[in-house]
Image (cartoon, grey):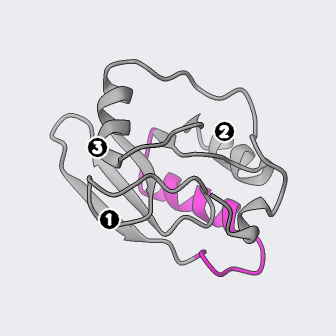
């Protein structure tokens, strides 16, 4: 199964980026083989629509779950519409997030965790 962890870097040892739509990178991991792909996020500097565009990218990449710090309402709705599980409140490294997800330590989020355009503030 493919999952995505938002990341500040290109490796499994990189810290989780707390933003979804405007994270620096998406680390897409096959949970069976642990092979991964680091995808630059083209939406980092987007004026608007970053969450929706990022959510659509996850659907195109056939991701089944997204692990991140926070998601806004538009991103959350886009991911949900695509049948992608959203797990928020993630911190630490990408590798730890993947390990904890595989061990069943996370629960799906029940809704967005920040307001629209929160990622534009560059917040952690």
Residue 13 position within the rendered picture, expressed as x and y whole percent measured from the top left: 26, 53
- Dividing the picture into quarters, in which one does residue 123 lie? bottom right
The residue that mark 2 highlights is 80
Residue sitting nearer the eye, 9 or 53:
9
Q: Quadrant of the N terminus?
A: top left
Q: Residues within 10 Å of mark 2 (few under 14, many from 20)?
A: some
The residue that mark 3 highlights is 95
User: Secondary structure beneath disc 2?
Assistant: helix
**Residue that sits furthest to the top in the current view:** 104
Q: Tell me the CA gap for discs 2 and 3.
A: 24 Å
User: Secondary structure beneath disc 1?
Assistant: strand
Residue 35 position within the rendered picture, expressed as x and y whole percent measured from the top left: 18, 50
Residue 25 position within the rendered picture, expressed as x and y whole percent measured from the top left: 44, 66
User: Counting residues from the N terminus, which is met first, the one under dot 2 or under dot 3?
Assistant: 2
Q: Residues within 10 Å of mark 3 (few under 14, many from 20)?
A: some
The stretch of residues the image draws in magenta is 43-64
């Amino acid at each position: 199964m493919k999952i995505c962890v938002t990341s500040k870097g290109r490796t499994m040892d990189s810290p989780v980026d707390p933003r979804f739509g405007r994270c620096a990178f998406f680390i897409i991991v096959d949970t069976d083989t642990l092979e991964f792909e680091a995808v630059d996020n083209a939406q980092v500097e987007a004026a608007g629509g970053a969450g929706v565009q990022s959510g659509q990218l996850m659907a195109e990449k056939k991701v089944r779950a997204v692990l991140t710090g926070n998601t806004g309402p538009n991103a959350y709705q886009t991911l949900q519409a695509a049948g992608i599980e959203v797990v928020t409140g993630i911190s630490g490294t990408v590798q730890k997030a993947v390990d904890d997800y595989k061990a069943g330590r996370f629960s799906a989020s029940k809704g967005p965790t920040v307001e629209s355009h929160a990622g534009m503030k560059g917040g952690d």
